[in-house]
Image (tube, grey):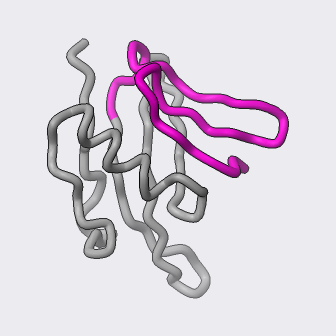
Amino acid sequence: MAIRVFVDDVGIWEVHPNGTTGFPWSEIMSVSVYASLLPPDEQRVVGMDVGHVSGEYLDIVEMIEGFQQAVPAVAARSGCDVPDLSALQPSDGFVEIYRSAL
């Protein structure tokens, strides 16, 4: 699992114990945030789904360091409002905060 996520002018990146992975902006199709309930206790978790042109994706959850800074950085890049992550509900589905012009 990633230990940190960050967003820069080049792309969205996850830092792992064995290196850094991620996608450059030129290969990112969309970024959405979502809330889900995890069994068995129905624990609410918020995440960010980063879709790649190949169909691969990164799923970054709120427990990862840098998540709270990454979401507004992505939204700012697309010029959209930052969703209220504390109010996000599973019934809201995926809320898009970035879409590639491709």
- Quadrant of the rendered structure where residue 38 is? bottom right
Q: Main secondary structure of the magenta part?
A: strand
The C terminus, quarter of image: top left
Q: How many marks?
A: 0
- What residue is rendered at 63% in x and 48% in y? 4
Please give the name of the residue rendered at 26% of the width and 22% of the height, measured from the top-left corner: 100
Q: Does residue 66 appear to the left or right of 73 in the view shown? A: right
Query: For the magenta stretch, what is the residue range?
Result: 1-30
Q: Residue furthest right?
A: 18
Indicate whether residue 14 is drawn in magenta. yes
Point out residue 57 in the picture as x, y percentages from the top left corner. 51, 34
- Is residue 39 shown above or below 11? below
- Give how far across and how far down residue 60 sits, in percent: 53, 49
The single residue placed furthest to the bottom in the displayed view is: 41
Q: Is residue 47 above or below residue 43?
A: above
- Residue drawn at x 25%, y 44% as measured from the top left: 96
Looking at this view, name the residue that lies furthest to the left: 80
Q: Tell whether 74 sits left or right of 1.
A: left
Q: Measuring 31% from the left and 49% from the top, which residue is drawn there?
A: 72
Q: Residue 95 location, x and y as percent?
A: 25, 51
Which x, y percent locates residue 94?
30, 52
Q: Nearer the viewer, residue 65 or 86?
A: 65
Residue 68 is inside the magenta segment: no
